[in-house]
Image: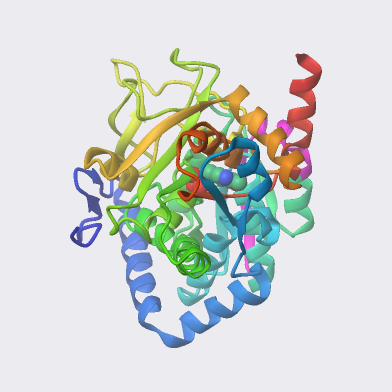
Amino acid sequence: MKKQPDERGYFGDFGGRFVPETLMVPLEQLETTWLKAGKDRNFRNRLKELLERFVGRPTPLYPARRLAATLGGAQIWFKREDLCHTGSHKINNAVGQALLAREMEKHRVIAETGAGQHGVAVATAAALLGLDCRIYMGSEDMRRQESNVRRMQWLGAEVVAVESGSRTLKDAINEALRDWVTNVRTTHYILGSVLGPHPYPAMIRNFQSVIGTEAFSQIREATRSLPDLVVACVGGGSNAAGIFSAFVPFDQVRLVGVEAGGRGPAPGEHAARFTEDGKPGILHGTLTRVLQNSDGQILGTHSVSAGLDYPAVGPEHADWEAKGRVSYVRISDDEAIAAFKLLARTEGIVPALESAHAIAYALQVAPAMPLNARILVNLSGRGDKDMDEVARLDGAS
Ligand SMILES: *Cc1c(COP(=O)(O)O)cnc(C)c1O
């Protein structure tokens, strides 16, 4: 495959830069700084040091033997991003972009957050590097994720409630973009997934590709071969792009992205963009697959996991799907919760509900695979944040 994206930020037919004129200059500055940093040994060493000493990398590759034995099929290996500082892969990107903000001599960072995981990661990176920090969060999400709001405040961030629209992630991104337009000279916008205008999707995939690079050599060392199947959940798509990137060139490795099937296939009940309601469209500065009705109105979404609950998907995923390199499947709320509970009991690992979607898919396919086959699942985060939500659902049923 040729180098992705092209110089205009397109992955095949998807991607690009659809923004107001005022954002063209900071996006070009960001792209230049990022490309320069990639060649700068000092920057790379600084990032590597923080990933090791602060984030806790490399994260382990773990064989889930009891889980696999329960199923009676393929081996299951977990890449343990749940063991990263702050509890998910989001910190890999937050630290990388916070370092870039300093390179650009911007002393203020802003970010959006849904469940609060990206907000916590950015507030953490900002505290680490001494940057001012403001996080935009839908007021509905603030209510659902009260403890993360407090965590961000303890870390020194100002959390701003967004009251527009559905008062969730999509609205928080709109508000963060508005702030950025007004304060471009002092401020860097740390986007949380492989979304948005070029260079964000490529840059964030690169910051997350450390997951794939590590997993690739870890599984080769442990099994003397490549995995047969790599599975990751897909919200915006950053943890999936991070782990897939190392395996994309190897056609013998099957790659599967798992979307939120929610409560079912009716519009508004899920966040599965690779269905007939997911059509090419522009959202938040990029051309990609977007859940929309026939008038182009963005559809509502639902998932038990806030991190998968977004109407668009990263443009590189749209391209991988169009080219047939990655397949995308759906897992329902109920299937994800069952996987969450099974993993806790068989392996002593409480996964994030997002990650539980990827695990649920592995549970479906492992029994029919040969005993010597290997499934690599990206365990994108831990489930501490989901305790209240699962307890609430248990109470309701
Ligand atoms: C945010 C989040 C996701 C979804 O985001 P991606 O960009 O698709 O990776 C998945 N898992 C966890 C634990 C998250 O916090």
- In the rendered image, residue 51, in percent from the top left (x then y), is placed at 59, 72
Position of 4 with respect to 101 (left or right) is left
In the image, residue 256 sits, relative to residue 245, either above or below, namely: above
State whether residue 52 appears in this view.
yes
- 278 or 352, which lies in front? 352
- In the rendered image, residue 121, in percent from the top left (x then y), is placed at 63, 57
Residue lying at 51% horizontally and 57% vertically, measured from the top left: 190
Q: Which residues are magenta?
A: 131-147
- In the rendered image, residue 32, in percent from the top left (x then y), is placed at 32, 71
Position of 22 with respect to 101 (left or right) is left
- 73 or 56, which lies in front? 73
Residue lying at 52% horizontally and 35% vertically, measured from the top left: 367
Residue 24 lies in quadrant = bottom left
Residue 125 lies in quadrant = bottom right
Q: Quadrant of ligand 1?
A: top right
- In the rendered image, residue 325, in percent from the top left (x then y), is placed at 27, 45
In the image, residue 371 sits, relative to residue 328, either above or below, namely: below
- 83 or 360, which lies in front? 360
State whether residue 19 appears in this view.
no
Residue lying at 29% horizontally and 58% vertically, measured from the top left: 250
